Amino acid sequence: MFPKKYFFLLSWCVLALLQACNTSYNYDQLKEGDLLFIVGRSTSEQTGAIKRSTSDRGEIPYSHVGIVKFEDKDVYVIEATPSDGIIQTLLYEFMQKAEKQKGKPLIAVGRVKPEFQYIVPSALEKAGDQLGRPYDYAYEERNDAFYCSELVRFSYLDSLRNPIFPAVAMTFKNKETGKTEAYWEKHFAGLQLKIPEGELGSNPVDMSKSSVIDIVHKYY
């Protein structure tokens, strides 16, 4: 028979763990349409290359972004991933992709400002319509595929159907050395494409600093 004192101890530990999760991460404060910027794990060559070519020294090197969606009693993130294309991921699975510091993931919650909140329902609908589409390995805004920040950019459209996130000049060069990352040279050579250096696009770091959103919470 399970000793009563151990039962109470186990119950207390479970309760404490649940309270710690809710208190530390404040998942209940998320709103539909929030953008989750994560510092992805550096085990991926692509993630490392994205960090080195889009973030300056001292900046948080966000390498991925997704859109929060509520469905029934679950919380999902609509995201563009190299492995599976455009998918809808459970929130806790999305969090597991983030690099961790002191046991907590490096994630920022971006929320479009009040004057743009009217866009959220249509943005979720547009992002949802892309589920199943392929990942945009070419980083080309004129095709039918999407990379992560491109999916966000073309989901959040104003009343005139223009993106509220302005395009920025893309770079595939290491921010410190000024030289093109070897990963990108190999990547685009494999696609038989020219590196789109200077072409218009987007990236999670610049998007996280956009004037149309507020960073309302960070998880460390």
Image (tube, rainbow, N blue to C red):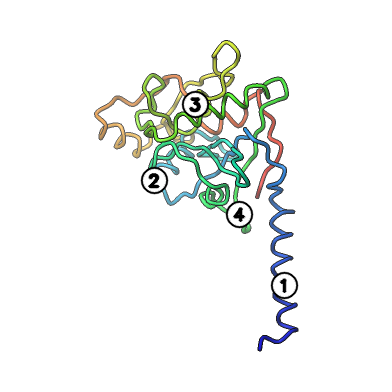
Q: Toward which corner of the image does residue 198 lie, by quadrant?
A: top left
Q: Secondary structure at mark 1?
A: helix
Mark 3, residue position: 202
Comparing labels 1 and 3, the label whose residue is closer to the camera: 1
Mark 2, residue position: 45
Q: Is residue 57 left or right of residue 199?
A: right
Decide which of tag 1 and tag 2 comes sooner along the chain.
1
Q: Residue at (63%, 47%) from the top-left corner?
A: 73
Q: Residue at (40%, 35%) from the top-left corner?
A: 132
Mark 4, residue position: 101
Q: Toward which corner of the image does residue 45 lie, by quadrant?
A: top left
Amino acid beneath label 1? Ser
Mark 1, residue position: 11
Relative image position of residue 69 (x, y in whole percent)? 59, 38
Q: Is residue 111 above or below residue 40?
A: above
Comparing labels 1 and 2, the label whose residue is closer to the camera: 1
